[in-house]
Amino acid sequence: MSQVPKLRRPQITPNVQSVGTTQSDGPSAGGVFPASLDDYEIIDGTYVLYYKGGKIGTAYELVKIDGKSVVKEVAVYMVAMINAAHADGIKLRVTSGFRTMQDQQTLFNQSSNAALASKPGYGTHQTGLAADFNIYDKDGRVYEWLVKNAYKFGFIRTIPNERWHWEYWGNWTGQKKPDWIGGSRERSNRMKHRHLAMFSKVPRIHSCGDKKFGGNFMMRESDWWTSHGASEPHTDALTSGATNSWIGFSGEFLAAKLK
């Protein structure tokens, strides 16, 4: 497997204007009422949440979903989304959820590349909002389902080169906004959680190699669709990772399906 490509190669942004896309932020996230957690294990405890290196609050209940921990306030929307996916014949699974400081430290120590794991206290999995999903399953059909439906449950993508990473930025339908959202008023780096639209963080039209994202977000070869069975040519390979990450397994521009 090759190393992360350098930005020396030309970036190719696919011509997606021909399918009627715009630069809008897409539909708003949230609105689906929370699901029951009766069938899930709930673990009480004291779980400190972090953002940009600072403590923003404490969660007291974690829900085990597919063996992964998810903060209860977010789990009610995640379970609703998983149930909806299953009803559509899609087995949506959580592959990573909330991470404690020790979890993040272990992952950071094991990472061969600092870009692959955030420093402890800085990863969004420590905010309680983030989860990773099995987007490479079923020839990309899991990912396509998420692109079409996740915003209805409050989940949007926030990292250009990580198709699997989704975060809750919904409107907290059915419950009071958690006290830990937003962090302490004394902290200038508090999260300031707000209701966002689907393409607020990862625009419809973008290139993973674009420096405007504030870092090297080139997609690794191991994450290209061609590394998971897709036929070439595919923009992931054609651009050496400087792809538009809304493009699916078949090469279709999935963001065009949302108006």
Image (tube, grey):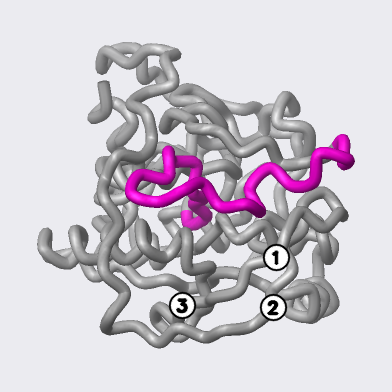
- Is residue 185 part of the magenta span, yes or no? yes
Question: Circle 3 sits in a helix, a strand or a loop, which is it?
Answer: strand
Q: Which residues are magenta?
A: 164-188
Quarter containing the C terminus: top left
Indicate the amino acid at tag 1. Thr
Work out whether residue 130 or residue 186 is closer to the camera in this orientation and state it. Answer: 186
| Other residues around mark 3 within 10 Å, as few (<14) / some (14–19) / many (≥20) | many
Q: Is residue 223 left or right of residue 110?
A: left
Question: Circle 1 sits in a helix, a strand or a loop, which is it?
Answer: strand
Residue 46's label in the rendered image is: 2
**Residue 79's image quarter?**
bottom left
Nearest to viewer (mark 3 / mark 2): 2
Q: List x then y, in percent, for residue 219.
A: 61, 48
| Other residues around mark 1 within 10 Å, as few (<14) / some (14–19) / many (≥20) | some
**Cα–Cα span, label 3 and label 1:** 15 Å
Give the residue pinned by disc 3: 63
Indicate the amino acid at tag 2. Thr
**Cα–Cα span, label 3 and label 2:** 13 Å
Work out whether residue 187 or residue 6 is closer to the camera in this orientation and state it. Answer: 187
**Residue 256's image quarter?**
top left
> Which tag, 3 or 2, sits closer to the chain's start?
2
Give the residue pinned by disc 1: 58
Label 1–label 2 contact, CB within 8 A: yes
Work out whether residue 87 or residue 241 is closer to the camera in this orientation and state it. Answer: 87
Indicate the amino acid at tag 3. Val
Task: Name above or below for residue 12 compared with residue 145.
Answer: above
Q: List x then y, in percent, for residue 234.
A: 40, 42
Q: Is residue 24 left or right of residue 180?
A: left
Residue 22 in sight from this viewpoint: yes
